Amino acid sequence: MFHLRTCAAKLRPLTASQTVKTFSQNRPAAARTFQQIRCYSAPVAAEPFLSGTSSNYVEEMYCAWLENPKSVHKSWDIFFRNTNAGAPPGTAYQSPLPLSRGSLAAVAHAQSLVEAQPNVDKLVEDHLAVQSLIRAYQIRGHHVAQLDPLGILDADLDSSVPADIISSTDKLDLAVFKERLRMLTVGGFYGLDESDLDKVFHLPTTTFIGGQESALPLREIIRRLEMAYCQHIGVEFMFINDLEQCQWIRQKFETPGIMQFTNEEKRTLLARLVRSTRFEEFLQRKWSSEKRFGLEGCEVLIPALKTIIDKSSENGVDYVIMGMPHRYGRLNVLANVIRKELEQIFCQFDSKLEAADEGSGDVKYHLGMYHRRINRVTDRNITLSLVANPSHLEAADPVVMGKTKAEQFYCGDTEGKKVMSILLHGDAAFAGQGIVYETFHLSDLPSYTTHGTVHVVVNNQIGFTTDPRMARSSPYPTDVARVVNAPIFHVNSDDPEAVMYVCKVAAEWRSTFHKDVVVDLVCYRRNGHNEMDEPMFTQPLMYKQIRKQKPVLQKYAEVLVSQGVVNQPEYEEEISKYDKICEEAFARSKDEKILHIKHWLDSPWPGFFTLDGQPRSMSCPSTGLTEDILTHIGNVASSVPVENFTIHGGLSRILKTRGEMVKNRTVDWALAEYMAFGSLLKEGIHIRLSGQDVERGTFSHRHHVLHDQNVDKRTCIPMNHLWPNQAPYTVCNSSLSEYGVLGFELGFAMASPNALVLWEAQFGDFHNTAQCIIDQFICPGQAKWVRQNGIVLLLPHGMEGMGPEHSSARPERFLQMCNDDPDVLPVKSDPSQAYCSVFQLIIFTPKSLLRHPEARSSFDEMLPGTHFQRVIPEDGPAAQNPENVKRLLFCTGKVYYDLTRERKARDMVGQVAITRIEQLSPFPFDLLLKEVQKYPNAELAWCQEEHKNQGYYDYVKPRLRTTISRAKPVWYAGRDPAAAPATGNKKTHLTELQRLLDTAFDLDVFKNFS
Ligand SMILES: Cc1ncc(C[n+]2csc(CCOP(=O)(O)OP(=O)(O)O)c2C)c(N)n1
Ligand SMILES: [Mg+2]
């Protein structure tokens, strides 16, 4: 708009013939875009009709006049001639003139021109009014579209008709229509009146209602606008700030007769509705007292999804990843969209079915699915995957996106032409859950985009028992999608053809612009929240109407029969054919005695598992690297591996220090991370590190992305310059989201077992805004869905006097989720025998230790033959004379450095041994037993800097006691219990620290308790 206004303001007076020549040389024949060269010098403010939306229209007229002065109305011709003849700005037609704008002479001159052409004013105003009217329909027509199949609630929660639309909610009632027209015209919003209805108006290029016509009578303009925008489809798109995209949508919805279906398409639609409807009826007949969260009231969802998939397949997509809640017909989607064998679904209703897999398993409507088949409409292969999900509505959204991104990444689909996602939402959840917003904000970020998701909202106008008028503040449940400029197509789901049409357009939009799009299926929920629930308690009027509502299948069948597209026997035959399919599958389902959850995997990892479903390898190979490799990675990490690249002076110093460390054969944490990543990349393992500010590192220690100080956006990732055939390294700063981004990375990690996907929290405590992903997916995912996931969480943790925030990554919570039994000593001490849900996934990373001079390792500790050490035993003087040791302190993390400093200061290196536990879960019972046995005269104490009710104590103590068969007490040296993770007062922090060190080294302190 700004652009057009500016252009219009620059129109310069030229004679028509002069300008036509220049103009036609400067633009392609068909294009009707405005060329800057044609400039009209009047400032916008001087021509009131050039303000707002009218400038488009005047510009149109001017273009037409330049090409052929006779092509416009005589009044326009005169107006432009007056202008070009030198009528001062604002005086060519204006009446009355703002005195402040021109000289009295100019006013007099203009007045004479206007008087010479008395109809000009009216004509210009009328054309502008018509243009405004067209635009009003495009912007607000959806507010009067007939979207609610029940006809009782307005989909936008507002029953008023926008003031600038000449529509009536009862469009067939001419009297109402006339009254509305009168209200808008008499005295008028538009200055039009009834006599104008038969006048012919030129149409601007911003509308397609004309089809082949460039002008139409006003009556027909209104009728066509009503057809396009106020029937069963409400199109919300005018907030999109891209002209091409707006034109594309206008063309799809305004072109007369564009919504046509062949008889074949209608029959396919009917057949799909038959399947959708009869599937639910079949379940209802067989298991009338079971919850199934059926689709009744939105049966059109199945043909809608199939249309999106057909159309996308036609456009080259061969893998569709879907996410949906447990609700509205998930089983139906599995059966009729993904095409899971019906007997596999039906057998799950059998309460005697035995579970074959370890773990908890999950209810049938949470399980995922992966299926490759031929798309019958396009005859192309298509893979469909429905991601398993928890009850937590919308939680699967970012997971689906992440998986989609990974599948695109691994098949080189850089533009999302082959792999796409479809997300289903409920109206209440879409509006209410913040994760929806977080996920939308990932949609256009370079390292997170999946190049467009098709969102389908099952808008049954209720959330459990809550009326939408109490559940959201936005007009539509879909308003959240506006933040990413996604077009939103609201559609009345009792009009199946309208639904199919918007789904087709949505799929085309995605394949044309590779951006998100929303289909809002305005429907109803025939039953209660589930099939057992009584909806009349809370929605009496709505449900009175629903009881009267004819099912959509019946309605559509009647329409097609009346059109002669099918006849009644054909329709009935279609029904009995599908019923028979269901019955036969039901008979077969009785043979299923065992439920294998692994048959419900959404992301199979071919080759990773044995036929029994066990991972092929659980050994922990040596992690050592040769000196050459260590040196090579170290050298790359301390250099800028591209030419003519200027880095910041401070960074040069950091890299120089790294280089010196490499010469001295030592590593700090950042360099060690480089070594770890670099060596995996060498082995062909893709690594993706994502999170807030991970490229540099929150603590400015990492610097995996170098920035040229002279060229905007020129960056270098040295890690990608290690070896010619290495795997790619992806490191990406994320949006400021934890829930969304962790979910996304979890989804990314689902796609392949041969990748290392890491998510780093800015500070460890921020993980709790992503708690749902941890509690519902990471921890129980394997138990519920037999689905492994290799995601790694890096959580900066440590008590450093920074206050209650930023101190604790809450290790106690992760440990509480682990399922190794504190009271059972594993029979074999091999860690691979221990089964744990959050197995080696959570790493509590350091902050101050990143720069601690003692937190360094030598290359020697990383050479071939070295392994990850689950426990680092005491190796100082205490270990030389273990009988003399009075106390064996166990600890983990950074408190070790405080303990060793204090021990040295107190000259107790021979009396107190300190053993570090590096892997808390699975608990290293075997190694700790050896440690305890080594120091027969030592008291045992656990030391931690976290408060007593936090940290590791509650986890470690019972396990240590089991290790030693409860032969001795395990004492505690640490802070008292507290509600906050840390004090905000620096002095208190230091006092607390000193107290815990005093306890740790006071050899008499526990005497009174024994
Ligand atoms: C995060 C979350 N909060 C609460 C619930 C409980 N719950 C289950 S369904 C439902 C209503 C959902 O309404 P809507 O999104 O409109 O979907 P519908 O049930 O109407 O299909 C609620 C609140 C849940 N499953 N997830
Ligand atoms: Mg709902």
Image (tube, rainbow, N blue to C red):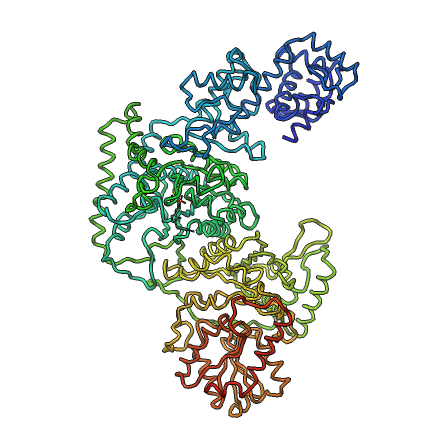
Identify the image quadrant of residue 20.
top right
Q: Residue at x 41, y 22 (%)?
A: 170
Q: Is residue 416 above or below residue 162?
A: below
Question: Can you say which quadrant of the picture contains the N terminus?
Answer: top right
The residue lying toward the viewer, choosing from 1008 and 814, is 1008
- Asked if residue 154 lies left or right of residue 600, the reply is right
The residue lying toward the viewer, choosing from 543 and 745, is 543
Which residue is at the far top? Answer: 116
The answer to whether one can see residue 500 in this image is: no
Q: Position of residue 291 (x, y in %)?
A: 29, 49
Q: Residue at x 53, y 85 (%)?
A: 1005
Q: Position of residue 534 (x, y in %)?
A: 29, 44
The residue lying toward the viewer, choosing from 524 and 589, is 524
Identify the image quadrant of residue 133.
top right
Q: Position of residue 632 (x, y in %)?
A: 63, 67
The answer to whether one can see residue 619 in this image is: yes
Q: Position of residue 434 (x, y in %)?
A: 49, 49
Q: Is residue 801 above or below residue 647?
A: below
The residue lying toward the viewer, choosing from 271 and 502, is 502
Q: Is residue 268 above or below residue 959?
A: above
Label total for image: 0
Q: Quadrant of ligand 2?
A: top left
- Asked if residue 273 lies left or right of residue 438, the reply is left
